[in-house]
Image: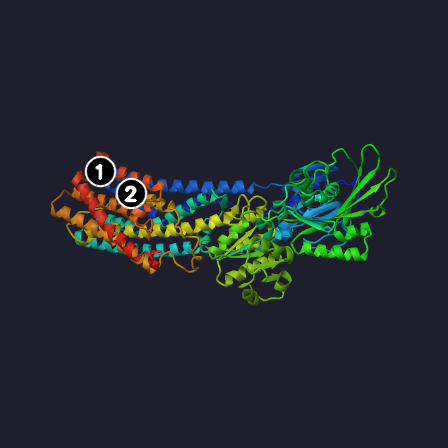
């Protein structure tokens, strides 16, 4: 801007800045508030188990049984404590994630430069932009000195774009493209210096507008959560109705409504599937921990189980498939190519024929570059391929820079050779600009243009390099006054992450379709697609084509398209929604603000943790802490493993509830039979034995073929009819075994305490057997024991110790109303428990290849 004077600019005063903060608010996006202690408490007290524990404990207090009451009410505080602890851990994790990026800003206020927090930047602040700075707000550029900005977080374009001075117009162009006078919040300065006036902060920035677009996107509950909720409601209603029936029948037939109420509550607690949501939470929480060991942070637990059903992976290119840094991949000089991906396998060092090209590429760059292209050239010269220091010229004196401009997209550096006073001039820039500087003939330009096309078709950003010499004397005003000699081309690319190709192959093997969605050019995206082994690279759509399509047309096109190029943020959202409308379960990766709406709308949003924006990270379900694309494969494998093991755990829980409910109901139905299970027994079974055994299933290794299966069908329930029938039969087998022990003990005229102890011991031993047999529905117990599961050993030892304590420690034995058991009694219980699960082991041998056993 012509009238902008750096020396006289004063900027805002502190008082004016404070007034603008009051008027416009802080320069930050609103975030959701963490739940307070009252909200968490309300969630806890609404749980059915909590209510039943309080009611049961209150009844025992009324009856004067303080020991039972205190034990039951103690579990109330255990449940609340676990919930509060988990809530606090979640809040801490989110706080740490939010602090990963906290940009600061350099502003001019009261005529002085000062560093302030990015959140304190206000409209009309004058900000100073330097290499490495992150732009704190949307601003118009008042003075640009060789200024370039990486806007890939907003546009997906991998290359920095040039910025120019504002000409005083009011048109506010969008991000992307060279020679525009606006910079945007969250983007990165890669080269040069700039002064800009802030025009929008907070929610009014381009970043903020994307945030507002996300507000209308409702978060969806996972299918597993919905299915579990339905199952819990059905069993809860059934148990509630039967509980009322038991209370009435018991009270009317026996005249003891208090005992009837306790029996009804005991049955309700036996029927209540409280473990289902508990086990779901345990699996998801431990799954999140296991996935974190693969450098994946889980922000939304529901994404873990959804991973196993993912059918489409939509991935951006820059920073996800590629490393988001420039690397010299191919160079051209004197009619010869050198491809570092191919030729370095044959050569120990770079051939000397190319030294001069690299030498002048380095001389035309900053000594300590920040620009990714200059860093790549410097890295090539200093560390990797040049066998000596001839190209570096550390003793040469830098004299002057001729910056690139809109008129000439090339820059030159002038160096003085020590001792003789001569000047060496190194130029690099757009090939056409270098052609102009070298005054090449039309014939030479045509030949070299073919070379450029060939390199560009490989997804390369091509720079031309030239050199010139000048004797001692006055330097010219413009670059055109030098006599340049053309040296060649340097082709740079954003290198593919080394683990991506293998990850893509594994996704295809697992039946997951991979699609690239990028804001970059089509030819670059296709090249990357070919390099990573993407299928159907020729099936592509550009953003311009999408603009001409209706949602219905887009739904049809996405069925066979593998690459979407030059895509805008709102188009990414349309693409994801089109896949979802076709019934696909969509995983979406991204790191930029432009990815945030699509990340939120997808079934599984996956953000980059290293270079991703706060908006992308806080929107996503999963965050790749190491930005390693292959970590998604590990997450998918774990997601499938978690679903498999969760299904086994749920089958186990359904099975074990059958004998628990049955043994609670039998004494009620048959008058004169002693009560086997009291509320204390139920609480110990449900809060200790069942969840503990469920941890065994969570720790179980995945089946060998887990990544060779197609994705789980979208509407496949956790429990189909086969699983329900088999689980019920497992439970009935245990119930029959316990019933036989119970009737045998009564027939032998055992003491009531001994009868209860025998039945309970059989139930505990059968519980262990049920855990062992459900480790796999395809492999028998001897086969599964070959697979080490340390948790299994710990749990079995714990259960045996627990059983020994309640049977042989007098205080605990009296609390549980047990009699003393002898060794032959325990052998009898063990035999009955073993027989109860033997039939299922035999079925595995004959039906392991059937669908219900896979």
Q: Position of residue 576 (x, y in %)?
A: 54, 58
Q: Position of residue 778 (x, y in %)?
A: 33, 53
Q: How is the image coloured?
A: rainbow
Left or right, 342 with respect to 814, comes to: right
Give the number of the disc on residue 603: none
**Residue corresponding to mark 1:** 807
Give the position of the C terminus as an image quadrant.
bottom left
Q: Is residue 436 left or right of residue 565?
A: right
Give the secondary structure at mark 2: helix
Q: Nearer the viewer, residue 424 or 160?
A: 424
Residue that appears at 31% across and 57% down: 724
Provide residue 727's location: percent of width, then percent of height: 30, 54
Seen from the viewer's position, the closer of residues 801 and 792 is 792
Q: Residues within 10 Å of mark 2 (few under 14, many from 20)?
A: few
Residue 651 at x, y percent in the picture: 33, 52
Residue at the location (67% across, 50% down)? 159
Q: Is residue 469 visible?
A: yes
């Amino acid at each position: 801007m012509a009238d902008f004077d750096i020396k006289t600019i004063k900027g805002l005063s502190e008082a004016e800045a404070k007034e603008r903060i009051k008027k416009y608010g802080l320069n930050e996006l609103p975030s959701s508030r963490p739940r307070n202690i009252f909200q968490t408490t309300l969630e806890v007290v609404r749980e059915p188990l909590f209510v039943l524990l309080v009611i049961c404990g209150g009844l025992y207090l009324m009856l004067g049984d303080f020991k039972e009451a205190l034990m039951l009410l103690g579990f109330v505080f255990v449940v609340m404590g676990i919930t509060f602890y988990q809530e606090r851990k979640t809040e801490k994790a989110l706080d740490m994630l939010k602090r990963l990026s906290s940009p600061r800003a350099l502003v001019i206020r009261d005529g002085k430069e000062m560093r302030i927090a990015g959140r304190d930047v206000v409209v009309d602040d004058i900000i100073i932009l330097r290499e490495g700075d992150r732009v704190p707000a949307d601003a118009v550029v008042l003075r640009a000195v060789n200024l370039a900005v990486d806007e890939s977080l907003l546009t997906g374009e991998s290359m920095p774009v040039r910025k120019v001075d504002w000409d005083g117009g009011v048109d506010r162009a969008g991000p992307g493209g060279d020679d525009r006078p606006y910079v945007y919040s969250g983007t990165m300065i890669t080269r040069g210096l700039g002064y800009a006036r802030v025009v929008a902060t907070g929610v009014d920035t381009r970043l903020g507008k994307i945030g507002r677009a996300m507000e209308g996107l409702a978060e969806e509950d996972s299918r597993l959560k919905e299915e579990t909720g339905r199952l819990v409601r059905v069993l809860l209603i059934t148990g509630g109705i039967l509980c009322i029936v038991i209370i009435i029948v018991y009270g009317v037939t026996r005249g003891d409504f208090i005992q009837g109420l306790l029996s009804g509550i005991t049955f309700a607690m036996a029927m209540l599937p409280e473990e289902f949501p508990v086990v779901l939470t345990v699996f998801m929480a431990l799954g999140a921990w296991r996935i974190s060991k693969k450098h994946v942070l889980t922000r939304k637990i529901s994404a873990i189980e959804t991973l196993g059903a993912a059918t489409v992976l939509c991935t951006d290119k820059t920073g996800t498939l590629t490393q988001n840094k420039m690397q010299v991949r191919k160079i051209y000089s004197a009619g010869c190519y050198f491809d570092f991906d191919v030729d370095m396998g044959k050569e120990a060092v770079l051939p000397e024929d190319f030294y001069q090209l690299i030498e002048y590429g380095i001389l035309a760059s900053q000594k300590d570059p920040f620009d990714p292209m200059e860093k790549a050239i410097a890295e090539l010269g200093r560390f990797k391929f040049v066998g000596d220091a001839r190209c570096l010229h550390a003793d040469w004196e830098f004299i002057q820079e001729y910056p690139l401009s809109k008129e000439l997209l090339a820059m030159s550096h002038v160096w003085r050779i020590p001792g003789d006073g001569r000047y060496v001039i190194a130029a690099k820039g757009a090939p056409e600009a270098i052609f102009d500087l070298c005054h090449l003939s039309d014939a030479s330009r045509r030949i070299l243009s073919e070379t450029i096309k060939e390199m560009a078709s490989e997804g390369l950003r091509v720079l031309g390099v030239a050199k010139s010499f000048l004797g001692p004397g006055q330097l010219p005003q413009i670059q055109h006054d030098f006599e340049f000699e053309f040296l060649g081309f340097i082709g740079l690319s954003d290198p593919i992450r080394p683990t991506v190709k293998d990850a893509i192959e594994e996704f295809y093997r697992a039946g997951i379709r991979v699609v690239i969605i990028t804001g970059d050019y089509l030819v670059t995206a296709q090249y990357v697609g070919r390099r990573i082994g993407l299928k159907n690279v020729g099936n592509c759509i550009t953003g311009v084509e999408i603009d001409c399509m209706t949602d219905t047309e887009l739904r049809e096109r996405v069925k066979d398209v593998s690459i979407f190029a030059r895509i805008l943020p709102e188009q990414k959202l349309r693409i994801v929604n089109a896949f979802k409308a076709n019934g696909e379960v969509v995983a979406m990766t991204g790191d930029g603000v432009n990815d945030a709406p699509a990340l939120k709308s997808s079934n599984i949003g996956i953000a980059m943790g290293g270079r991703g924006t706060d908006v992308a990270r806080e929107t996503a379900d999963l965050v790749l802490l190491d930005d390693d694309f292959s970590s998604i494969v590990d997450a998918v494998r774990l997601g499938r493993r978690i679903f498999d093991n969760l299904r086994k755990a749920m089958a186990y829980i359904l099975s074990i509830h059958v004998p628990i409910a049955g043994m609670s109901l039998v004494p009620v139905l048959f008058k004169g039979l002693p009560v086997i299970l009291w509320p204390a027994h139920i609480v110990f079974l449900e809060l200790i034995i069942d969840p503990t055994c469920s941890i065994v299933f969570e720790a179980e290794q995945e089946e060998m073929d887990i990544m060779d299966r197609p994705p789980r069908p979208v509407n496949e329930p956790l429990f189909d009819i086969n699983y329900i029938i088999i689980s019920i039969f497992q439970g009935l087998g245990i119930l029959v075994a316990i019933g036989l022990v119970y009737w045998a003990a009564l027939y032998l005229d055992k003491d009531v305490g001994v009868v209860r102890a025998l039945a309970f011991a059989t139930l505990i031993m059968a519980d262990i057997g049920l855990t062992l047999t459900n480790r796999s529905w395809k492999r028998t117990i001897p086969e599964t024991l070959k697979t080490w599961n340390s948790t299994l050993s710990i749990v079995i030892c714990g259960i045996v110790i627990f059983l020994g304590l309640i049977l042989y420690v007098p205080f605990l034995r009296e609390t549980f109303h047990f009699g003393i058991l002898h060794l032959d009694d325990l052998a009898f219980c063990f035999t009955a428990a073993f027989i109860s699960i033997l039939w299922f082991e035999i079925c595995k041998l004959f039906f392991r290849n059937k669908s219900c056993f896979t």
